[in-house]
Amino acid sequence: MTTSRQNALFDADEHGADLPVPPGDAGGAALDAAAPLAERLRPHHLDEVIGQTHLLGPGKPLRVAFEQGRLHSMILWGPPGVGKTTLARLMSQAVKAHFIVLSAVLAGVKDIREAVVEAERARAAGQRTIVFVDEVHRFNKAQQDAFLPHVESGLFTFIGATTENPSFEVNSALLSRATVHVLRALEPAEQRQLLARAQATLEAPPLSESAADRLIGYADGDARRLLNAYENLVAQAGPVAELDESSLERSLGEQLRRYDKGGDQFYDTISALHKSVRGSDPDAAMYWLARMLDGGVDPRYIIRRVVRMASEDIGNADPRALRIALDAAETFERLGSPEGELTLAQAVVYLAVAPKSNAVYTAWKAVRAFVAQDGTRPIPIHLRNAPTKLMKNLGYGRAYRYAHDEPGAFAAGESYWPDGLSPPSFYQPVPRGLELRIGEKLAELRRLNEVARQAESAPDTGPDPAD
């Protein structure tokens, strides 16, 4: 097996990991000058990390672990270029742990066994060990199981990095022994911070606002992709007063023109896909789907929009549409691209041919607007929960009619609205698909309510006591 130092070198080549140059290393300065920009800007202290404030902010889980030197096995799950390798290295530096890097693409059980031997030597020398596994989802079950006894015994702390959902890709036994921390793609404001550091490091000309917007859209939250593209832009632009959009287009070429996440083309294309589904044209919907995938759109973004379409444009006219959209999302997480794209196409076609209804979407907007302007009305006594004797004595829940004890499991005439509020009718089912039958049922329930209320308000016609 290679030493941990050699592993770190390999990781730097393959994954851009930061590597401190030991004193006396004659090639250190040259290596630093020749290193990619993403490598030179890699944080060497926790406070230099941009993004992941939900994990690294004051009092947040990983911040506390860093500050207290409290190691725990973990899975770092997130998209490319968000700092998974960096956080693992910073953790090892913070606790002065021996750091062993394995790449699941190339390593096997033999390498894991050799890492165990190395960890035992470190423990004998009084040093803790972190074993970092990049692309851990690529290890099979036997390889993942090989870590279990050593994680259990505390021989080393296990940190795995993955871009795939660990619920599907990591063994449950290993997953139960590690905390999953979800890393997020960098926000546009965070990418601007990174660009500012990059400009200062390269002493580059300023970047125009429009060029910055398009570059950030192209990077799609991936810090490495952002910095590599920016470095190429600066190198190709030469001595100019400003780096503008034309410079960016010359630098990135077809990559930028085919799919512009930061510009109108992105929004226009997703709009065309959505409107094709809404308009029940499966061929057009597949065309725009293919355009987006071919242009480099993250399929997960498309999936989120497809799930939204299932509720917004189909709703209860065909409730299966939402389930099919969610199944497509789950299947894509299992298969990835390109295999998972077929299930996305299947979902888009189903949504396009399904009966359409925006009744729930329209009703929900109306309800929210109504609640916002109406204020907070008291909850009627008969609808309140009564878990204690005091609440029961106050009348909470009294006179509530349990629907399952009523004919047809419907308490005709019962009111579920605040007192004094004339019940509005927000949900209006369309006469299509399942909502056709839903509308018929609601009409019948409203008729039963009206009959019951009329009977309740009718004058008493019992026998006259004088008779």
Image (cartoon, rainbow, N blue to C red):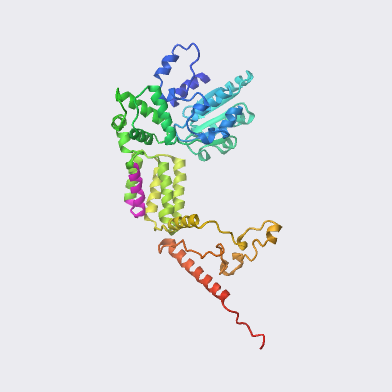
**How many marks do you count on the picture?**
0
Residue 16 vs residue 210: left or right? Answer: right
Q: Is residue 287 in sight in this rendering?
A: yes
Magenta stretch, residue numbers: 266-283
- Asked if the stretch drawn in magenta spans residue 115, the answer is no
Give 26 or 56, whichever is nearer the viewer: 56
Residue 134 x %, y %: 49, 29
Residue 185 vs residue 291: left or right? Answer: right
Q: Residue at x 42, y 32 (%)?
A: 191
Q: Residue at x 50, y 58 (%)?
A: 374
Residue 237 x %, y %: 30, 25
Residue 465 x %, y %: 67, 85
Residue 332 x %, y %: 44, 43
Picture quarter with the C terminus = bottom right
Residue 377's place in the image compared with 11, above or below, is below
Give 321 or 105, whichever is nearer the viewer: 321
Residue 177's place in the image compared with 34, above or below, is below
Tell me the chief SS of the magenta region: helix
Q: Residue at x 51, y 27 (%)?
A: 47
Give 9 or 443, whichever is nearer the viewer: 443
Q: Is residue 103 in sight in this rendering?
A: no
Q: Residue 236 falls in which quadrant of the image?
A: top left
Give 246 or 172, whichever is nearer the viewer: 246
- Asked if the stretch drawn in magenta spans residue 282, the answer is yes
Q: Residue at x 62, y 21 (%)?
A: 123
Residue 375 vs residue 429: left or right? Answer: right
Residue 216's place in the image compared with 322, above or below, is above
